Amino acid sequence: MDYKKFLLFGDSITEFAFNSRAQEGESDQFALGAALCNDYTRKLDIVQRGFSGYNSRWGLKILPRVLENEQNIVLSTIFFGSNDACLGGHQRVPMEEYASNTRKMISMLREKNIKPILVGPGLIDQERFEAARKEEVERGYIRTNENFEAYSNKLQQIATEDKVPFVDLNTAFRREGGENWRDLFRDGLHFSGKGYEIFYNELLKSIRKYYPELAPECIPTRLPVWREVAEDGSNVL
């Protein structure tokens, strides 16, 4: 059976979206990917294409190959920025190039009649993350909340101008996290279950507002429910 698809495209935060247990010995946590699979069961297939450490420059290079090999995509996130916004290091992408790369990816999706959703960088617990990545910090891989906010604002501007839904995690994390916002991360940068749950809620809110026909509750379930199936299965298909 061929299902239409919902593509999750981005960096490590997308790659780790199905992790229900971030580290061995920890209790299970909320997993964005699994939650979406549950919502869209028998409706859309969730296709995860997340690439740890990647930025919008590299994402732009690989998106054509992803689209070439995945047919019937109807909806897609574009979630880069946490690496682009580094102050140094080879992951860094200047803001104007970040904007250009994003616009090109939007165009690639729209050319294939795929509805795009932009997702902006959240926050970073800089002290915690840098304590675990001292060698990277020495080489200039520094991330700050000020720069994350600037890149998020730029993405929001693109979303407004290009009429694309925007998931504003920067604002959502500040609002929902409150004094305990650091609990939204497992290492200072990558999301904990609590962080992914906020992402999930904001993503579905955006889908329901801008693409209501693709909200889980608005897509018909494939095939009859079992109680309606004839004993010989003659009405299944």
Image: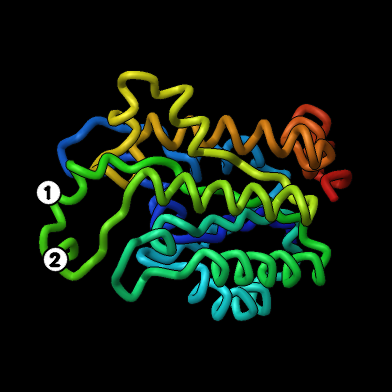
The count of marks equals: 2
Q: Residue at x 75, y 36 (%)?
A: 215
Amino acid type, label 2? Glu
The alpha-carbon separation of the residues under discs 1 and 2 comes to 11 Å
- Considering depth in this image, is 120 or 220 the residue closer to the camera? 120
x and y, in percent, of residue 59 in the image: 52, 72
Dot 1 crowding, Cα within 10 Å, few <14, some 14–19, many 20+: few
Q: Which image quarter: residue 82?
A: bottom left
Judge the density around disc 2: few (<14), some (14-19), many (≥20) Cα neighbours within 10 Å: few
Q: Which mark is residue 73?
A: none
Taking depth in this image into account, of 205 and 125 the one nearest to the observer is 125
> Residue type at mark 1?
Ala
Q: Secondary structure at mark 1?
A: helix
Residue depicted at 57% across the width and 43% down the height: 37
Which residue reaches farthest top? Answer: 179
Q: Which sits earlier in the primary sequence, circle 1 or circle 2?
A: 1
Q: In the picture provided, is 227 more to the left or to the right than 83?
A: right
Relative side of 153 to 213, left or right: left
Residue topped by disc 1: 131
Q: Is residue 136 above or below residue 219?
A: below
Depth check: 182 or 142 in front?
142
Say which element carries label 2.
helix
Q: Position of residue 172 (x, y in %)?
A: 51, 30
Q: Is residue 231 visible?
A: no
Quadrant where the image shows the N terminus: bottom right
Relative image position of residue 24 (x, y in whole percent): 17, 43
Instruction: Name the residue tied to disc 2.
Output: 138
